[in-house]
């Protein structure tokens, strides 16, 4: 029986584990945290339940494919619930746009501030669908492991059709002129940890993905995806070790042959690293075994990390009529936060603020009449100059005050349970390089379309997760785990 050791029990690692175990492999997962899930964790504060991590769930079929590849029905393990009302977007002048499949209603809402932009919505959504179809057919569902894969004529043709040198912001300006509309659709670049003024226009596919294909809640909370994959993995005989940190990837000759932890050595035919490629390469491989491009200490600096996030979990004793399951509040001048994040590397002064109220969709997530609010502000990746332990408390207060001014009146005094989570804590908990949520940013064509390979230069070592192909985001990470496992089985 062939043996695989998987470093990291996030969704990518679990997906790979399930696929390999279903094919008869002996699989061991080593997870450094107390619980599986990586960046996605379940948090309980008194009577309030929260998911800390991914909350906007799309591409249900990506998760379904993992269960189907193991011969199981996903519905027996996790239940996805469509959020038909979509995502609410609230602008400083009181304008509201709810992004969902009701395009006629979206047109009415946009027409309230720009009739011209409302007439451009449907042509833009057709372009969004075109880009999604190209990405789905040629990029997201296959690995690009060899030069033959990367120079496939059909792939190259598709790459030209998505116009890799055109930025998302420039594409949007071909359709829209009003700042609200540009902010509304530009914000989708943050779904991959990036700046709409620098990210390629391929990410204009995300409005179609969210509005038409749908956004989902998960019964019991988003962490139920992790629980479902864990349960299936255990049924398939996967050995799971939590609170077990990998110290070193063992290399024999030119091949990865196992993983050393504090207390044991786990021998393997294959090692799958479900973590940031940059962190794994620097921390778990001896310098002599790293790719030549990574052997110098500053080598990883050529990659720009994605943005990170500052999280405030707020359990309140009341509910807010303005909120939906997903709500985004925009500042007066959207876009300045990216200068703060990527250039000045400081907490943004005027950020967009995202609020997830999962209790709106599912009862029992908060005491009756209360709210469980996951509040997220985009933040810079970790630097030596920014000390979150010094600024975190004040920044949480400022974020609550900004929400109060935007319509969540009395939020600060209504909080009866709260917790903060900073990029530095994310870095320590998950070994994410510089605390970046999505691995490397997609702020250039090269970092979008030529990400670090899923297959190491060392035989027997593979990578899954947001830094590698097909990119950041919960469904894509699930896809990467399955695709890597299938590549291993076929090699």
Image: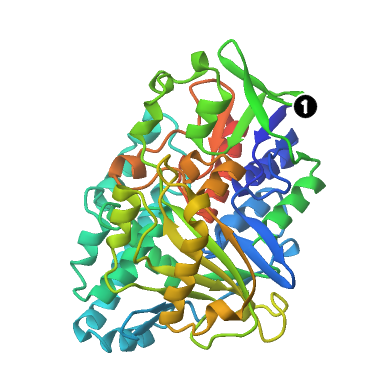
- The residue lying toward the viewer, choosing from 435 and 63, is 435
Left-right relation of 182 to 49: left
Report the front residue among 461 and 193.
Answer: 193
- Which part of the image, by quadrant, shows the N terminus? top right
Q: Front-most of 308 and 402?
A: 402
Q: Does residue 136 lie above or below 107 as drawn?
A: above
Which residue is pictured at 36% across the width and 58% down the height? 189
**Image spot of residue 168 (x, y percent):** 27, 58
Residue at horizontal 49 percent and vertical 39 percent from the top: 433
With 447 as the anchor, is 425 left or right in this view? right
Q: Is residue 214 visible?
A: no
- Residue 153, given in percent of the width and then of the height, sits at 30, 39
Which percent across, then down, holds residue 471?
45, 47
Display coloring = rainbow
Q: Is 456 or 186 nearer to us in this picture?
A: 186
Question: In this figure, which residue is indicated by the disc labeled 1?
Answer: 1
> Looking at the rendering, in which quadrant would you find the C terminus?
top right
Rendered location of residue 87, percent (x, y): 46, 75
Q: Residues within 10 Å of mark 1 (few under 14, many from 20)?
A: few
Q: Residue furthest top?
A: 253
Numbered disc total: 1
The reply to whether residue 71 is visible in this rendering is yes
Quadrant housing residue 374: bottom right
Residue at x-position 40% and y-position 74%: 329
Q: Secondary structure at mark 1?
A: loop
């Amino acid at each position: 029986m062939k043996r695989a050791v998987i470093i990291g029990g996030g969704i990518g690692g679990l997906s790979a584990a399930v696929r390999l175990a279903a094919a008869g492999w002996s699989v061991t997962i080593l997870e450094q945290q107390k619980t599986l899930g990586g960046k996605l964790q379940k948090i309980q504060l008194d009577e309030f339940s929260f998911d800390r991590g991914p909350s906007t769930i799309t591409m249900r079929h990506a998760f379904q494919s993992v269960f189907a590849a193991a011969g199981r029905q996903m519905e027996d393990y996790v239940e996805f619930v469509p959020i038909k009302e979509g995502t609410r977007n609230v602008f400083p002048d009181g304008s509201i746009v709810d992004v969902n499949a009701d395009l006629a209603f979206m047109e009415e809402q946009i027409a309230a501030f720009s009739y011209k932009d409302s007439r451009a919505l449907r042509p833009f959504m057709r372009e969004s669908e075109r880009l999604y179809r190209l990405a789905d057919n040629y990029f997201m569902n296959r690995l690009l492991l060899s030069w033959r894969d990367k120079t496939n004529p059909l792939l190259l043709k598709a790459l030209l059709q998505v116009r890799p040198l055109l930025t998302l912001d420039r594409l949007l300006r071909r359709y829209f002129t009003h700042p609200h509309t540009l902010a509304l659709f530009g914000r989708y670049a943050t779904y991959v940890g990036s700046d709409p003024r620098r990210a390629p226009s391929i990410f204009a596919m995300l409005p179609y993905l969210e509005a038409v294909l749908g956004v989902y809640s998960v019964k019991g909370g988003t962490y139920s995806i992790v629980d479902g994959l864990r349960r299936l993995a255990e049924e398939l005989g996967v050995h799971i070790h939590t609170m077990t940190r990998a110290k070193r990837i063992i290399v024999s000759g030119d091949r990865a042959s196992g993983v050393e932890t504090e207390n044991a050595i786990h021998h393997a035919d294959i090692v799958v690293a479900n973590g940031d490629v940059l962190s794994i390469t620097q921390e778990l491989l001896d310098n002599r075994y790293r790719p030549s491009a990574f052997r110098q200490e500053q080598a990883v600096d050529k990659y720009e990390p994605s943005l990170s996030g500052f999280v405030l979990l707020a359990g309140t004793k009341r509910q807010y009529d303005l909120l939906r399951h997903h709500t985004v509040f925009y500042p007066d001048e959207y876009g300045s936060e990216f200068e703060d994040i990527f250039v000045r590397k400081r907490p943004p002064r005027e950020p967009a603020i995202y609020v997830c109220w999962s209790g709106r969709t599912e009862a029992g997530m908060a005491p009756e009449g209360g709210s469980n609010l996951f509040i997220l502000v985009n933040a810079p990746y970790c630097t030596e100059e920014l000390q979150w332990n010094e600024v975190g408390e004040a920044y949480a207060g400022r974020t609550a005050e900004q929400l109060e001014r935007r319509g969540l009146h009395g939020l600060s005094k209504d909080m009866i349970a709260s917790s903060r989570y900073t990029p530095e804590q994310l870095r320590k908990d998950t070994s994410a390089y510089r605390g970046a949520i999505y691995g490397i940013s997609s702020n250039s064509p090269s970092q979008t379309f030529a990400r670090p390979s899923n297959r190491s230069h060392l035989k027997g070592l593979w990578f899954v997760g947001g830094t590698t192909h097909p990119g950041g985001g919960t469904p894509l990470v699930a896809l990467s785990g399955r695709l890597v496992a299938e590549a291993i089985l076929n090699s």
